[in-house]
Amino acid sequence: MIDYHSHILPGIDDGSRDLEQSIKMARVACGLGFTKIVATPHYEEGMTEYYFPRYPEMIREEVERLNNTLLKEGIGIEIYPGSEVMLSPNVIEQYEKGKMITFGDQGTHLLVELPLNFQPLWVDDVIYELRLRGITPILAHPERYIYWQNRLEKIEEYINKGVQLQLNLGSLAGKYGKRVQKTAERINKELKIDYYGSDAHTEKGYEILSKLENFNT
């Protein structure tokens, strides 16, 4: 199985604090049946450049280091580079400057997120510009956006505009509360999910998935 959304890289964002914790996360994930993980550390315009001016290079280096470590530890998981990009009006400019990493560093898909509590007016324009450049936006955890929880038709509108969906498995397990869980269940049943991810920031983000009777990523 593949985990398409994880904060397993150490010391880059609010995910794994160090290499030791990354190893713990990988062990738990492996025990659940995962064999591949796309590492998606947060990218937020301005803040990321300030703290990590070599953000893309750093991700690639940390992925290589973690893969080498997991191989030595005998943990059967391979890590792939990526990022989780907070959409902003300037994302296109930052993308063209190579400031972020696409899914698997393949240059075709980009995991993006929105503010949880409000939908900015410029979202449609940015998505259109990404599509114009041959990039397919993958919307992270649509079930968590308050403004869409009772309006799945709005999410479907974005699907029709070429946006793909990534659902958090933790949402299905109740990690974010009942409302998000019920929304996730509805989205999983009624809409097309292209990717599933743990959105794990620590080993607990994987451990909670054991509550699910079954899942298939």
Image (cartoon, rainbow, N blue to C red):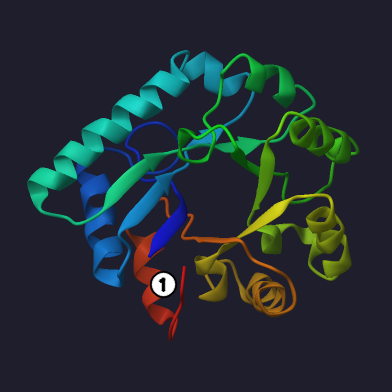
Q: Quadrant of the N terminus?
A: bottom left
Q: Is residue 201 above or below residue 53?
A: below
x%, y% of residue 89?
80, 26
Q: Nearer the viewer, residue 186 or 106?
A: 106
x%, y% of residue 193?
64, 66
The structure residue drawn at horizontal position 56% and vertical position 18%, both measured from the top left corner, is 98
Is 183 positioned to the left or the right of 31 in the image?
right
Is 179 positioned to the left or the right of 73 in the image?
right
Residue 151 in sight from this viewpoint: no
The amino acid at mark 1 is Leu
Mark 1 lies on residue: 209
Q: Which quadrant of the structure image shows residue 48?
A: top right
Residue 190 in sight from this viewpoint: yes
Report the residue that reaches farthest toward the right. Answer: 121
The structure residue drawn at horizontal position 26% and vertical position 32%, both measured from the top left corner, is 64
Is 201 positioned to the left or the right of 142 in the image?
left
